[in-house]
Amino acid sequence: MTPELNLSRDPAHLRHGSNIGQPLSRVDGLAKVTGRARYAADNNPPGLLYAVLAVSSIARGRVVSLDVDAAKAHPGVVEVMTSANRPPLAGDPDGKPNPFAFRFEALQNDRVRYANQPIALVVAESLEAATEGAALLSPRYEAEPARIGLDAGDAYVPPVVGMGFPAESYHGDVEAALAGSDRQITATYETPAHYHNAMEPHAIVAEWHGDKLVIDTPTQGLVMMRGRLAELFGIAPENILIRSPYLGGGFGGKGLIAGPQILGILAAKLVGRPVKLVVRREQLYGPFGHRSPTRQTLQLGASAAGQLSAIHHHARIATSSFEDFYEAAAHVTHTLYAAPAIATTYDAVRMDSGTPLFVRAPGIAPGSIALESAVDEMAEACGLDPLAFRVKNYAEVEPATGKPFSSKALRECYTQGAERFGWWERPLKPRTMRDKDGFLVGWGMGTATFHALMFAGQARAVIRRDGSGVVESGAHDMGQGAWTAFAQIAADSLALELDRVTFKAGTSDLPDAGIAGGSAHTATVGTAIHNAGAAVIAKLAELATTDQRSPLFGAGNAGVIARNGRLLRRDDEGRGESYADILARAGLTEVEGSGAGMPDPAANEQYAMSSHGAVFAEVKVDPDLGQVRVTRMIGAFAAGRIINPKLVKSQLIGGMIWGISLALHEEAITDRRSGRIMNANLGEYHVPVNADVPAIEAFTVEEHDPFVNPLGIKGVGEIGITGSAGAVANAVAHATGVRIRRFPVRISDLV
Ligand code: MOS
């Protein structure tokens, strides 16, 4: 295995070295399984104090009194921070300096906008004392009725949905097409609120050194968070260091800074000592975002032969009383099936909840379970097999825009997935398969899709005098394996063996890696690293080819190959020299290059860019008890170049499990009178455990995409969820003959 970077060819068509494409184990795996990995809450600077939040038990109103004296009298309590004494902020927590700055609560007044909103922070010498102090605050409220649920208030058309899609989008004449179609279905699907529920709770250790701030907190967006903190605290970004080397899951919930973290920093300022705040599990259900519940109505029209003529996808969603975030649940319908007329519309209500936020496969996850269910309902109305129906309505170009796809190996996913699953044995009629124990058996499938996005990110690469490399980017590893994938790309970008390259990530003083979200991190930062490495090698080549003493003299940049720490003449690979020799002769201790990764506007103008997949699921349902078990699941995915097949498989399986979760398990239940989440814990907010997860197989099909970015990376973080939820829902309908349209599927809906 010889790492090689061939400079004689266009970077878009590089022949890659030995690291990209290898199923390497995580470079941070050993540190994690041996407990050496230090998560934010593991930091204990000298003089540390412990903070505990007091949170509101009402959803709307104001705090009338807090027994601060009682809390302060408790032994060990150092300070109680309320809206009366919290230090001032330079920026307004209710301000909106940029679209990613969400309004939040940082004790700016006595208002309560949702249950679990922070109303005070108790700081003590021990966690126990702080906990007890918080319990002694005995808040009294002036409560107003909570507005809860998707009919909480007057519905309005939101200004935009997601991070900027129009709330009303029409392609063709949907009404006319529906009216003229042989087959029509109209169905309404509901999904509940979802919470991120990362294993690691939000936490912060904050320490001020004069006007310099050092914090340990898990984040999916280091430099963006630093910018927001600089604005809020009125200090220069350079005076803030955020360390976030390890995260125990993010799922979107660690994308933006939230009120409790600001309170931790303010408390450290107030008491003049470092403060640690680890948010208790139930307190995570409020200030940190969640997925809005949705109520989606799908109208489909088709010919008798099963050709779609129209889709109208309407979504009702909710946001908070004080901020705008609109789950783009209908957006998936723009890209998936080739209906000549497509409309997506939204309306929204304001609720007394925390502000919703991006949650694993934002928009697409709930949108996909509705669309995939509706497509199955239409297939049934046309008397067609669900996969045959999807193939018949295969979108050769993106339906809503007419753009060609930059690549789309979905057909291969359908074919190979169906083959491995044995799909074509499936009887068309529901409730016709039983296993030997009498359980109803059902097979369902769903199409997976997720946009292939890129944000903007940067990287720096260095070759040192000894010929080894250092690559830096403030990237984030939430557990997805990014650290490893980036190290692989870094090594190949410098044409070095992996152990000759140090890859640094996870702190805000490194180059801005953008946000780890939208399944875009590998594409964004991978491209930046790739370009940074190429810049360094180009500098080395310049040094060598212009120096008469070098065997590469006169070879010209186009005639040089980088391979395993050496530059070689392309026309005579026996002639070359090592990076170390080039640097030594030039009298340099190192050579540095930087690179950026960002979307190519021209390519995005021309092409629709998405990953795709096909997921097949088998469920068994107890005919008497209605208990549903997923027994088998196979997913085939096309996501461009695969940097690390082992980690990608793990990402895809993780996504598929979240798909099972969406279909069968997860749901945040809000008490309509109090506005409180009734199952704000991992015992009652159900997510699949090992017993719920069957034999799952995920594999990728070959796909080359020359347009998305130089490495052809499309992203795999979220796509696994999207087809899987629908596949499970459709399998339940096939097993039982009962079409469930309110998720998660409940036993009581089946018997
Ligand atoms: Mo994700 S919801 O884009 O972190």
Image: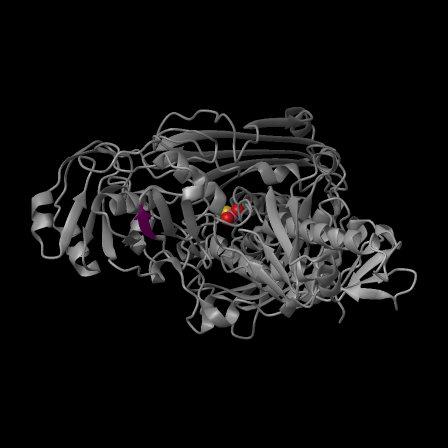
How many tags in the picture? 0
Chief SS of the magenta region: strand
| Image coordinates for residue 733, horizontal then vertical, percent | 55, 54
Q: Which residues are magenta?
A: 205-209
Residue 271 versus residue 418 in the image, above or below: above
Residue 92 versus residue 67 in the image, above or below: above
Residue 526 can be seen in this image = yes
| Image coordinates for residue 291, horizontal then vertical, percent | 44, 44
Judging depth in this view, the residue of 374 and 594 nearest the camera is 594
Judging depth in this view, the residue of 551 and 13 nearest the camera is 551
Most distant residue in the right direction: 571
**Residue in the picture at 69% in, 52% down:** 530
Judging depth in this view, the residue of 336 and 638 nearest the camera is 638
Judging depth in this view, the residue of 209 and 401 nearest the camera is 209
Residue 388 can be seen in this image = no
Please tell me whether residue 575 belongs to the stretch shown in magenta.
Answer: no
Is 137 placed left or right of 189 in the picture? left
| Image coordinates for residue 232, horizontal then vertical, percent | 36, 35
| Image coordinates for residue 535, horizontal then vertical, percent | 71, 50
Is 53 placed left or right of 529 in the picture? left
Q: How is the image coloured?
A: one colour
Q: Quadrant of the C terminus?
A: bottom left
Q: Quadrant of the N terminus?
A: bottom right
Image quadrant in which you'd find residue 574? bottom right
Is 476 placed left or right of 466 in the picture? left
Image quadrant in which you'd find residue 106? top left
**Residue in the picture at 40% in, 51% down:** 667
